[in-house]
Amino acid sequence: METVKVMLYILVFPGFLFQMIYSTYLEWVDRKLYARMQNRRGPLYTGWSGVLQPVADIVKLFAKEDVTPAASDKFMFNILPLVALASACTAGLYLPVWHLTGFNSFQGDLVVVVYLLAMPSFVLFLAGWFSVSPFSLIGATRVLTQLFAYEVPFFLALLTPAVVAGSWKIADIAKYPWASGNWWVIPLQVLAFIVAVLALQAKLERVPFDIPEAETEVVAGPLTEYSGKKLAVFRIQKDISMYAGSALIAALFLGGFGGGLYLGALQLVLKTLLVVALLSVIRGACARIRIDQIVSFSWRYLAPMSIVQFLIVLLLKGGGVI
Amino acid sequence: MAENTIKIPVGPQHPFLKEPCKFEFEIKGEEICGATIRMGYNHRGMEKACEDRNYYQCLYLLERICGICSHSHTTAFVQAVENLLELEVPKRGLYLRALVCELERLHSHLLWLGVAAHEVGFDTLFMYTWRDRELVMNILEEISGNRVNYAINTVGGVRRDITADQRKKLLEISTVLKERLAYYANIGTNEPSFIARIQGVGKMSRERAIEKCAVGPFARASNVDIDVRRDDPYGIYPELEFKVITSESCDILGRVVVRVLEMVESCKMIEQILQKMPEGEIAVQKVPRRVPAGTAVSRYEAPRGEDVHFVRSNGTDKPERVKVRAPTLCNLEAAAESVVGSYVADIPIAIASIDPCFSCTDRMTVLLNDNRRGVRVATWEELRRHGVDWYRQNKGIRF
Amino acid sequence: MKKVGLLLPEMMQHLTHRPVTRLYPFEKVTPPEGFRGTPRFKPNNCIGCKACVRDCTAEAIEIDVRKIDPPPGSPEGTKPTKKMVCTIYLDRCVHCARCVEVCPKDALYMDAEFEVANFTRDALKIVQESD
C-alpha cells in the first residue's frame, strides 16, 4: 500500500504528470506575456487563447523524424535527454507543494534540489560534446563557462533564507514566516530575491543569458543535432526546470504555499506566476550579451549583491534580532 | 595559424543569414583568426536574361533583383536608358521618383534596424521597428499598387500620380516616424545590453575602409564622406537640401546612428518634395522603342550604398549588355575583415551591419587575360589611379 | 548600471493596449484602390494586336486569333469573323501591369484579387474568349 502511494506521488502528484501539465501552463503564460509586451498576440488558436500551444509543439516534435549523427556515441546520445528530464523532475519532487512538507523532506534537501537543478546544464554540455559538430562544441563550452558565472551567486542567494530560518530543510524555510510571525524577513531579502531571479534566468538559458543556445549564432548550440523525440524531451525538461526553479524561489523567498489544500494550491499558482512574469519581463527588455560579458556581469554585480545580503542577514542573526 | 584552430563554416544555410553565402572562419577558442568568403549561391542569370528582352521587360525584370532595394535598380537602369534616348523627363515625374526613393530608404533602414536587433537577440526592438515599418509599406501600397516591387518607373517618367489624400497621409506618417526615430536613437545609443554588443565591435578604420572601397552607410560610419546624391546628383537632388550623415566611431554603433539619422533626413526630404513638387506631366508621352547605339553608366544611392548600372545598346529594342554592380559587393570583404580579431559571437552582427543583400550582389564577372591580340588588360592599381585622376580633374573631388 | 530597462515603459504600456496584429485570414484585408492584383481581359475589346504579349515581362499572355468562316447559307461577301482567345498564365505573371498600360483598346484591367494560390497549375491558367 505504501509502495503504491509512493508511486502515485512520484508519477502523478507532485511528480511527473503534474509537473508536465503545470509547466506547459507556465510556458504558455510566458509566451503570452512576452507577446503582449511586444504589442502582438502570442499563441491564439490551439485551445482557448492558445493554452494548448506548448502541448501542440511537443506533440509535433514527437511526430518528427529522429536523426542520430553517424559519428556520435549512440548510447550517450540517446540516454542524455532522459537523464536531464529525470533530474529536473526529481528536483521538483522535493518542493513543498502539498502539506507544506513535500513528498519526503529531510535536512539538507535544499542542497539536493540545487544540485539536481544544476544537472541539466552538465547534461547539456555532455549532449553538445557527444554530438560531434562544431556548433554544438562551441555551445557546449559556452554552457560550462556560463555555469561558472551564475552558479555561485545562485547558491549564495539561496543560502540567505536558510540562514534566516536556521535550517537546511526547504519545508522549514517556507514555514518560517508563518511559524515565527516575522513577516518582515520577506522584504528584507529583496537583494537575494533579485540575484536568485537573474541567476535562474541564466540557468534556464533565456535572453539576456541565452548565448549557449543563441539561434542566430550557433544554430542551436548543444541541441543542434537533436531532433524529434529527443528534442521534445529536452524541451519538456526546460519547462520543468522553469517550474522547479520558480517554485523553489517562491517557496524560499515568498513564504511558501501554506494554508491547506485550496489556499495552498492558489498560493502555488499565484507565486509561481509572479516569478515567471518577472522572468518574462527580463526576457523582453534586454538583448543577448556575450559570454565574457555574462561572466563579468555575474562576478561584478551578482556575486557582491548576494554577499552583501548574506552579511546583512548574518549580522541580524548574530545580533539576536531574527 | 594551423595549430589548434578549427574551421567553422557559416552558411550557405545559417539562421543569421537571410540569403545564402558561405563564410569560413578559423577560430581559436572564441577568437577569430581568419575569414574567407565564397559567394554565388544566388546567381540567377539576370544580366543574360536582359539581352533577350526589350527595354520595358528588362525594367520590370531588374526590379526583381532585390525586394528591398527594387526601386534603386529600376531607377538606375531607367536613368541610363533615358540618357541614351536623350529624353527630358518632366519635373513632376522626377519628383515622384525621388519621393518613392526616399520612402524606400525609410523602409529599408527600418527593416535593417529590426534585423540587427534580432541578430543580437533583442526581439522586442525587432517587433517595434517592423510595426512602424508597416506605416511606410501601407502608404507605398496606396501610391504604387504593391508593398514591394513598386513598378512605378517607366522609360520617360513614372506611371502613377499621387492624390491629395495620399499627400496628407505622407505628411502624417513623416511626423509620426520622426518621433519614433528619436525614440529608437535613444534606445540604440543608451540601452546597456544592446550597446554592450555593438560598441567597439566590427571596427573598420577610415583608411582601411577607403582601401577596401566601402560604400554607403558602412563607409559613412567610418567617417568617409561619400554620398552619390550629393557628389554626383541625379534627378532632382540638386534642388533638395539634406545633410550627409557621418560618424567617427567606425564601429557598429556608428552604423546604427548613421542609419537612424539618415531616416530622419529622409523624412525631412519627403516633406520638402511634397512642398516643392510642381504640377505638370508625369511622363514623356511618345517614347521611341528603339534605342540608338551607345553606352551609358548610371549611379544611384541605394539604401545600402552606391549602385552602378551599365547599359550598352545597339539600335534595336533590346539592350546588348546590362551590367549591375551592387553595393554589397564592395562592402563584403571589408565586413569579413572587420570581424578578424574579435569573438565568434560578433560574426552575425558584424556581417549584418553592412546590410548584406546577396541577391543584388551575385552577378557574373568575366576575366579576360588575352595579351596575344594586343589587348592590354589594366591592373587594379592602374584602374584605381585612372579613376582617382579623372575625378580630381573633372569633378574636383579628392579621395 | 546606467539606464537599465529603457524599453520597460513602452512594454508595460502595451500590456493594456490592443495588439496591432491583424487576424488574417479570419479578418479579411481589402487592398487599397489601384492595387495591382490579377490581370483580367475584356475580350470583346481585344483587336489582336498582341502588344501585351510583346511587352509582358514574364511571357505570361497568349492571344490566339481564330478566323471563323461564315456559316453556310449566309449572303455573299460576308467577311469571316475573328474570335480572340486570350490566355493568361497566373503562375508566371509578376503583376507589373505593363499589359494594362500598353493596350490601345482598354481590353485589360487589374482587379484586386491576390489570393490566387491553388493546388494545381491548370487552375492558374485563365482562358477568356470573345463572342
Image: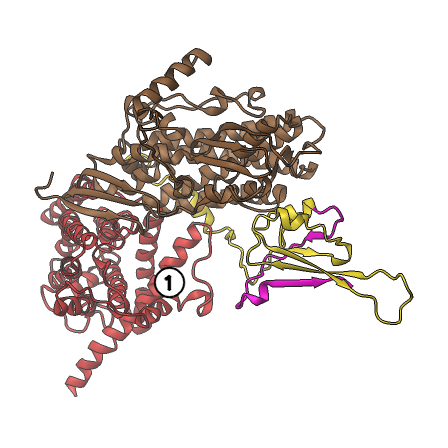
Chain colours: A red, B brown, C yellow
Magenta-drawn segment: C103-131
Q: Residue B50: x, y in percent?
A: 51, 42
Residue B276 falls left or right of residue A172: right
A210 above or below B112? below
Q: Residue A159: x, y in percent?
A: 14, 53
Residue B67 seen in render = no
Q: Nearer the viewer, residue B355 or A183?
A: B355
The C terminus of chain B: image quadrant: top left
Residue C46 falls left or right of residue A21: right
Q: Residue A31: x, y in percent?
A: 38, 58
Magenta run includes residue B215: no
Q: Residue A214: x, y in percent?
A: 27, 50
Quadrant position of residue C30:
bottom right
A86 above or below A311? below
Provide the residue designation for mark 1. A28
Magenta run includes residue C109: yes
The residue that appears at 15% across and 62% down in the rendered structure is: A71
> Farthest residue in the right direction?
C75
Residue A230 seen in render = yes
The residue that appears at 70% across and 52% down in the rendered structure is: C108
The chain letter for the residue carrying disc 1 is A
The N terminus of chain B: image quadrant: top left
Q: Nearer the viewer, residue B319 or A192?
A: B319
> Farthest residue in the bottom direction?
A1
Magenta-colored segment: predominant secondary structure: loop
Looking at the rendered structure, the kind of residue marked 1 is: Trp
Q: What count of labels does the image hold? A: 1
> Farthest residue in the front direction?
B373
A242 above or below B119? below
Crowding at label 1, few (<14), some or many (≥20) Cα neighbours within 10 Å?
Answer: many
Quadrant position of residue A70:
bottom left
For numbered disc 1, what is the local secondary structure? helix
